[in-house]
Amino acid sequence: MPTEPENPRPSPGPAATGIGRRRALLAAGAVFAAGIGAAAGELADGSRTPGRDGATGSATGGPPPEAAAPFHGARQAGVTAPQPVATRLLAFDLPQTTTAADRDTLRGLLGALTRTLAAAATDTPPDPRLQGGTTTRLTSLVGVGPALATRLGLDVPARLAELPEFPGDRLDPARGGGDLLLQVSADDPWTPAVLAELATAAARSAGAVPRWSQSGFLQRTAPGTTPRNLFGFKDGTANPDDEAARQWVWGPAGPHENGTVLVYRRIRMDTAAFAALPEDRRQLAMGRRAGDGAPLTGSAEHDEPDIYAKNPDGSYVIPATAHVRLSSPRLDGGARMLRRGYGYDDGPADRGLLFCAFMRDPAQFTRVQNRLAARDALNPFLEHTASAVAYVLPGAPAGGTLGEALWA
């Protein structure tokens, strides 16, 4: 949980036409506010900004249920569309042979995944298990890992790199890493499960080997409200606005402009031990009030935390070890991440957070996590068990394939 969100999420950017009935269901749902008027068309052409709750440019309101986030477009919908409540993350490895052969394998893999994901988003998906259901708002994203990019000489951002080891990490290599990462999300767990099966079959046929898979979920909330994490605190109040996202999330002008870097962390949370603390201690550890989500220095959820405010005795109102303080953009030159995290529950002793954050430079995460690892009051209740980094590719144009710019 290494960042503190404060503003609406960035614009999805320009999108291609050819929106089918099924893809038109993508941009609204239970955890996001419904809006009125022309929001659907504005979201589709990138002229409005969807927020965590589906809001377009604000913390309230949002697109109507038919707003569109097509598979084809400048950016992948798994980053730009409002966040569905169920997800499945998968990673694959490519066997190492020769550089030329492995590049051909990756081309085939990206082509197979493009066809599979695009077909699932059409009016008539070929698999009957994806037909005839209710609104699912299917979204997806595909990214390549740093090791594969280096091995094959791919055109990726120069700053793409694996994360260093952090104090307290207990990483299981079988649950993290990977040459290629795929995320599929929807408003029901059925759709990601079926699509994960189809994508895995397509990846195998292209020569890839499954590495790990992880399911996650979001709390369903009333329109315009923020979901809570398993500690009971509101999580993901807001995210960078368009201007901040252009600086901190998306790549600079050029071939990487519509790409970004995903940092994934599987974080086990000791929910029982945290819940046993008195409420005031939980709030001091987090730096926010549990009830309304407001920072300890504010009166409303969306108030900017004042990390320098002090009590009469000279102590900080938001303690020096509070999670909100240590993850504040004010300690990192204003840098912000786009957060799209999920909860997970793999048994009574293994529940927590699937931290998924998007940024231009993964070194940003390293700076924040180093501060948190050293002093965060939540550390006794957290254990990082898996990690991955991937360059999320620009979207595929209509008739095109993901990753077309990797071979420059």
Image (tube, rainbow, N blue to C red):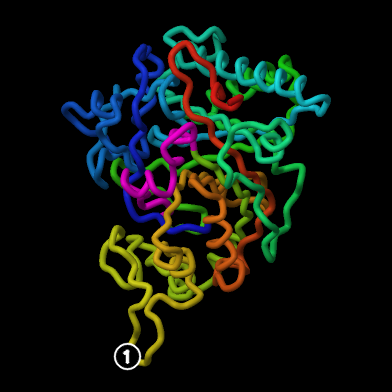
Residue 91 belongs to the span the image colors magenta: no
Q: Is residue 158 above or below residue 21?
A: below
Q: Nearer the viewer, residue 255 or 210?
A: 255
Task: Tell me the amino acid under the disc marked 1.
Answer: Pro
In this view, which residue lies farthest toward the left?
Answer: 37
Q: Residue 71 lies in what quarter of the image?
A: top left
Residue numbers of the magenta segment: 234-259
Residue of label 1: 312
Q: Residue 192 lies in what quarter of the image?
A: top right
Looking at the magenta stretch, what is its main secondary structure? loop
Q: Residue at x 60, y 39 (%)?
A: 390
Count of marks overlaid on the render: 1
60 sits to left or right of 227: left
Find residue 175 and report its horizontal and vertical position in percent: 72, 43
Q: Nearer the viewer, residue 374 or 295?
A: 374
Q: Residue 84 lies in what quarter of the image?
A: top left
From the image, which quarter does the C terminus lie in?
Answer: top right
Q: Is residue 84 visible?
A: no
Label 1 packing within 10 angstroms: few (<14), some (14-19), many (20+): few
315 sits to left or right of 94: left
Residue 255 belongs to the span the image colors magenta: yes
Find residue 333 and report its horizontal and vertical position in percent: 42, 63
Q: Is residue 173 visible?
A: yes
Q: Residue at x 31, y 38 (%)?
A: 50
